[in-house]
């Protein structure tokens, strides 16, 4: 900045966001009140549109770092408690290098599925191979079991060089039945694992539960530039959700991810797409069997 004149241009400075009658920039209050026909008023089709700005306001909220940077052209001032730094998220929006593609050979696909019911939440999926995200999708339908199964089947056919490994499903609430349904399907038998966010962490001294541990596992991957994307895996909504997540350190020194109820008080909706990604990168601890005096006992339970 010392040798450049930095000029920030907000969406409200552009021609499409000027009032067609007065010629003055619209305010956000005016934009939210516009009728449908005026929302589609476009001067330059290649520039940011009124409808997109309004949709981002409702989807992200005015305080979200993505809204601040993508709409208002402000350098986003994230909370010190943010799990994922906005800069890390932006840096990860890149194609994998040749070396990363080479390392991915022989690795398997891991998929995270965050299940939602009726309402504004989404059922979301995210797939990765090593540190490379290869696909993502989301459905607002109350019962997208068929759509998820078709999506997984298409993904496996699209990437025959990578075997299908694990499919982690959030089993809290209605996710339990969703998990059982997927586990009954031919290509997924033996590959579906339940993910319980409140389960005990592997490192119990540092994290309150497996959710916090999995979030910080992904955090470290973003921080160290381990994450890359294929084009079809880019998802601006997921990036916005990641940038709005917060954590806290409890008096006992353990880390806790902000509960959804507390996040909602800040105007943050359920981070369905972000949580699907967290599960896609979660650590899997296979079930071990040990025999003690002729009795088979489970020494370690799966995540």
Image (tube, grey):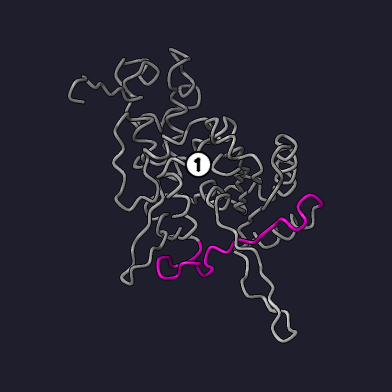
Whole-percent x, y for residue 182 in the image: 74, 54
Q: Nearer the viewer, residue 88 or 259?
A: 88
Mark 1 lies on a secondary structure that is helix
Q: Nearer the viewer, residue 126 or 137?
A: 126
Determine whether, in the image, residue 156 is placed left or right of residue 229.
right
Is residue 120 visible in this depiction of the protein? no
**Quarter of the image where one finds residue 64:** top left
Q: Is residue 200 magenta?
A: yes
Seen as rendered, the residue at the extreme top is 44
Determine whether, in the image, residue 124 is placed left or right of residue 295.
left
The structure residue drawn at horizontal position 24% and vertical position 22%, both measured from the top left corner, is 6
The structure residue drawn at horizontal position 36% and vertical position 44%, both measured from the top left corner, is 85
Q: Nearer the viewer, residue 15 or 2?
A: 2
Is residue 175 visible in this depiction of the protein? yes
Q: Which residue is mark 1?
A: 238
Whole-percent x, y for residue 258 in the image: 41, 59
The structure residue drawn at horizontal position 47% and vertical position 33%, both measured from the top left corner, is 93
For the record, the magenta segment spans 186-210
Q: Quadrant of the N terminus?
A: top left
Q: Is residue 280 magenta?
A: no
What is the magenta segment's predominant secondary structure?
loop
The structure residue drawn at horizontal position 33% and vertical position 30%, both measured from the top left corner, is 72
């Amino acid at each position: 900045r010392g040798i450049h004149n930095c000029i920030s241009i907000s969406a409200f400075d552009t021609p499409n966001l000027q009032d067609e009658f007065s010629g003055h920039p619209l305010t956000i209050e005016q934009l939210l009140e516009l009728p449908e026909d005026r929302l589609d008023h476009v001067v330059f089709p290649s520039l940011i549109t009124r409808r997109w700005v309004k949709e981002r306001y409702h989807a992200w909220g005015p305080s979200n770092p993505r809204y601040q940077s993508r709409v208002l052209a402000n350098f986003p001032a994230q909370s010190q408690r943010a799990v994922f730094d906005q800069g890390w998220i932006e840096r990860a929006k890149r194609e994998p290098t040749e070396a990363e593609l080479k390392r991915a050979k022989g690795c398997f696909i891991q998929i995270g599925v965050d299940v939602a019911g009726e309402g504004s939440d989404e059922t979301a999926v995210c797939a990765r191979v090593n540190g490379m995200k290869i696909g993502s999708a989301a459905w607002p339908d109350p019962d997208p079991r068929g759509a998820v199964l078709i999506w997984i089947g298409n993904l496996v056919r699209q990437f025959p060089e990578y075997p299908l490994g694990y499919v982690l499903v959030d089993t809290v609430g209605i996710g339990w039945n969703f998990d059982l349904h997927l586990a009954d399907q031919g290509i997924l038998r033996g590959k579906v694992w339940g993910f319980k966010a409140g389960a005990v962490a592997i490192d119990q001294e540092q994290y309150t539960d497996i959710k916090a541990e999995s979030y910080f596992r992904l955090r470290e991957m973003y921080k160290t530039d381990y994450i890359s994307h294929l084009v079809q895996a880019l998802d601006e909504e997921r990036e916005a959700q990641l940038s709005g997540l917060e954590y806290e350190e409890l008096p006992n020194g353990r880390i806790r991810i902000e509960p959804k109820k507390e996040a909602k008080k800040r105007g943050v909706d359920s981070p369905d797409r972000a949580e699907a990604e967290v599960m896609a990168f979660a650590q899997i601890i296979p079930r071990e069997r040990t025999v003690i005096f002729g009795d088979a006992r489970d020494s370690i339970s799966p995540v």
